[in-house]
């Protein structure tokens, strides 16, 4: 009887130990899972910018892939719009210039117009076809400032990774969808020259056709008025008594082309002119668009610590100046 009692107590102790063993095991797994979760989500450098960037990562991925696949479409659109403006100038504007302007003004328009057109085509072609510049692949005993986290390769100073091209770009400014190419060390001058001469060309077309635009706009309004009167007469009279249209089809197309030319050139001149001024300001400061953003954040961080930062010294520290 005593042996049976001892055996029963031993079984109770064994079950009690197993119960605590399973509980400790579950507790250890819960602690390990919490540790893994914290290690994946917690970072001492985490702030609101990192959280927002993480939340918008799917949007960035979608924009990068859409921009990559639609780059050819954007280039074709630039060529199409530019060609349409050139055709309208040759067909509609240039004949009036030859008929109404003096010989000196005709020579000036022909010279400047064709010179500007040649520079636009040349710099746009060079900006598209010229590689922006890539870090050398075979680097032997070459000192590097940092390593690209995506390429897992040495990254020289002023080099940034383009998520659309999926490679590092020397002195990267931005990825331009209208060029279907990155703007970097070797084609930045072609990009800026294209923006400059395209802006000058649009301003030239807008100023040259401003009088024709006013006349074409007045003619379009007159067309609408005559069309309303003609429809009213057609409702009151028979079809055979309906008066003919006041403007021919050729005149309608001519006036609409002039309005299209002026509106498009004026809009592009304002938008592209602002972009050109922005890049001109960056060039005078020796910065790119990405470096401008980085330097602004760095200045704000140093000012928050109560440190007075000199721009050129800061750029030298960050390796942005040669």
Image: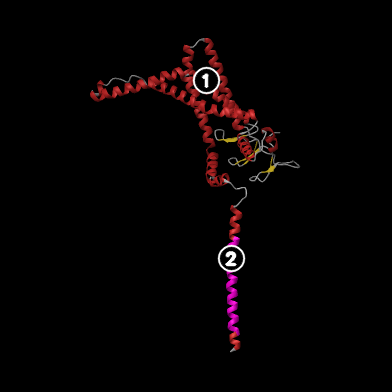
Q: Residue at x 29, y 22 (%)?
A: 229
Quarter of the rendering occupied by the C terminus: top right
Q: Residue at x 60, y 64 (%)?
A: 28
Query: Dot 2 lies on which element?
Result: helix
20 or 240, which lies in front? 20
Q: Residue at x 56, y 45 (%)?
A: 48
Residue farthest toward the right in the current orientation of the protein: 141
Quarter of the rendering occupied by the N terminus: bottom right
176 or 249, which lies in front? 176
Horizontal and vertical percent position of residue 107: 54, 13
Location of residue 247 with respect to 50 vertically, above or below: above
Q: Magenta stretch: give its range.
A: 6-32
Query: Dot 1 lies on which element?
Result: helix
**Is residue 14 covered in magenta?**
yes
**Is residue 295 covered in magenta?**
no
The label on residue 27 is 2
> Relative to 224, is 316 on the left or the right?
right
For the stretch drawn in magenta, the main secondary structure is: helix
Q: Residue at x 54, y 28 (%)?
A: 274
Residue farthest toward the front in the current orientation of the protein: 306
**Residue 84 seen in this snapshot:** no
The label on residue 314 is none
Q: Are marks 2 and 1 in contact (CB under 8 Å)?
A: no
> Relative to 202, is 126 on the left or the right?
right
Among the 4 quarters of the image, the one containing residue 39: bottom right
Alpha carbon separation for disc pair 2 and 1: 77 Å
Residue under numbered circle 1: 204
Horizontal and vertical percent position of residue 92: 46, 19
């Amino acid at each position: 009887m005593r042996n049976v009692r001892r055996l029963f107590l031993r079984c109770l102790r064994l079950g009690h130990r197993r119960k605590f063993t399973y509980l400790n095991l579950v507790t250890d797994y819960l602690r390990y899972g919490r540790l893994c979760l914290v290690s994946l989500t917690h970072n001492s450098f985490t702030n609101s910018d990192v959280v927002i960037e993480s939340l918008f990562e799917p949007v960035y991925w979608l924009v990068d892939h859409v921009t990559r696949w639609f780059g050819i479409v954007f280039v074709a659109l630039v060529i199409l719009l530019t060609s349409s403006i050139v055709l309208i100038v040759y067909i509609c504007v240039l004949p009036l210039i030859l008929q109404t302007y003096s010989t000196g003004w005709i020579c000036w328009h022909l010279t400047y117009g064709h010179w500007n057109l040649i520079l636009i085509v040349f710099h746009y072609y060079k900006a598209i076809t010229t590689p922006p510049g890539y870090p050398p692949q075979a680097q032997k005993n070459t000192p590097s400032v940092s390593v690209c986290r995506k390429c897992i390769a040495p990254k020289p100073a002023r080099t940034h990774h383009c998520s659309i091209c999926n490679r590092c770009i020397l002195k990267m400014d931005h990825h331009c969808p209208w060029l279907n190419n990155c703007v970097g060390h070797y084609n930045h001058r072609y990009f800026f020259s294209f923006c400059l001469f395209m802006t000058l060309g649009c301003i030239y077309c807008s100023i040259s056709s401003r009088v024709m635009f006013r006349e074409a706009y007045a003619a379009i309004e007159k067309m609408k008025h005559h069309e309303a009167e003609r429809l009213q007469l057609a409702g009151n009279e028979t079809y055979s008594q309906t008066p003919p249209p006041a403007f021919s089809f050729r005149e309608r197309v001519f006036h609409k082309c002039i309005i299209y030319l002026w509106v498009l050139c004026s809009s592009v001149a304002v938008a592209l002119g602002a972009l050109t001024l922005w890049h001109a300001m960056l060039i005078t400061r020796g910065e790119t668009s990405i470096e401008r953003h980085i330097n602004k954040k760095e200045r704000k961080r140093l000012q928050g610590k109560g440190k007075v930062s000199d721009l050129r010294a800061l750029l030298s520290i960050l390796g942005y100046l040669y």
